[in-house]
Amino acid sequence: MKLRLTLLAIACAVALHAAETLPLFNATLSVGKEHRFVLVDANGKASSFLGLGETFAGYTLKAYDAKTGALDIERDGKISRLTLVADAAVSSAPAAALPATVADAEVVLNKMHFDEMMERALRQQKQAIVNQFQQAGSRMIQQGIDPKEAAAFQKKMADEILSVLDATKLKSDVSKIYSEVFSKQELDQIAAFYSTPLGEVLAAKQPAVQEKLGAIIQGRMAEVMPRVQKMGAEFSAEQKAKKAAAAGGAPAVPKQ
């Protein structure tokens, strides 16, 4: 009888030990700020990658301390702390790209001082348009159109074109484009860069770059326009000469 009691006590102790054997914390995977874990039970069966709140072998994953690498699991109200086994697999995966919103894009554009850049660019563009229509108005007057009517028509055409060059609308368009082209993580990083001293310098000096580039473009346009006008005049002369020749008039002027 005593032997039976001893064997029964040993069996109960073994069963209790088996029941209290904690899973092994065998691997962790970091996906951005999210973590996944692999546990192995007493029989050597491994779990899939688990997240906090999921259960395995009767234990619920409760909390994880990334600094210490400790994982808390809970069973029957008791919290146990696991640490990675010595040969655990530890890896990091790139965070899944999150879709950006228009608001995310607007943060970046504000950091870039987009409003100021666009206003400056549009101011130059609007002035160029006004100059072109002033020239067109002068030609209308030369053709005999009443100066007042020519000026009114010129203003009407200019207003029609300038109505689409609205800085607020363009910012909205650009924000939408940014939100479609960039992920949220990318926009967050761009915004973070423009918040650094170097990023602020870049945003502050960008108008000076645009101004210098605009001067270069205007200079090159000034250089090429006389050649383009000469090409147009020569082409018109050649076409008139061809028509005259076809009509039996003076022979066509040979192309030089």
Image (spheres, helix red, strand yellow):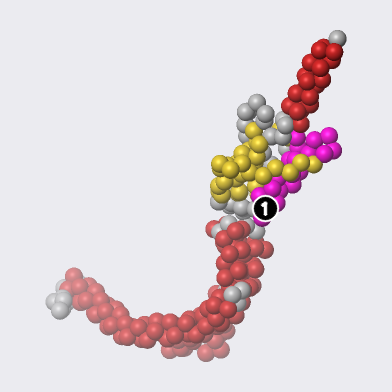
Q: Where residue 126 appears, x then y in whole percent?
A: 53, 81
Frontmost residue, 80 versus 191: 80
Q: Residue furthest top?
A: 1
Residue 42 point in image, percent of width and height: 67, 29
Question: Where residue 70 appears, x then y in whole percent?
Answer: 69, 48
Q: State which quadrant residue 175 falls in.
A: bottom right
Q: Quadrant of the N terminus?
A: top right
Q: Is residue 170 visible?
A: no
What residue did someone put label 1 on?
Answer: 68
Question: Is 208 placed above or below 32 here?
Answer: below
Residue drawn at x 60%, y 58% is: 185
Q: How many marks?
A: 1
Judge whether residue 251 can be spotted in this image: yes
Camera-side residue of 48 and 103: 48
For residue 192, above or below residue 184:
below
| Residue found 55% across the figure and 47% down from its top | 91
Q: Which residues are magenta?
A: 59-78
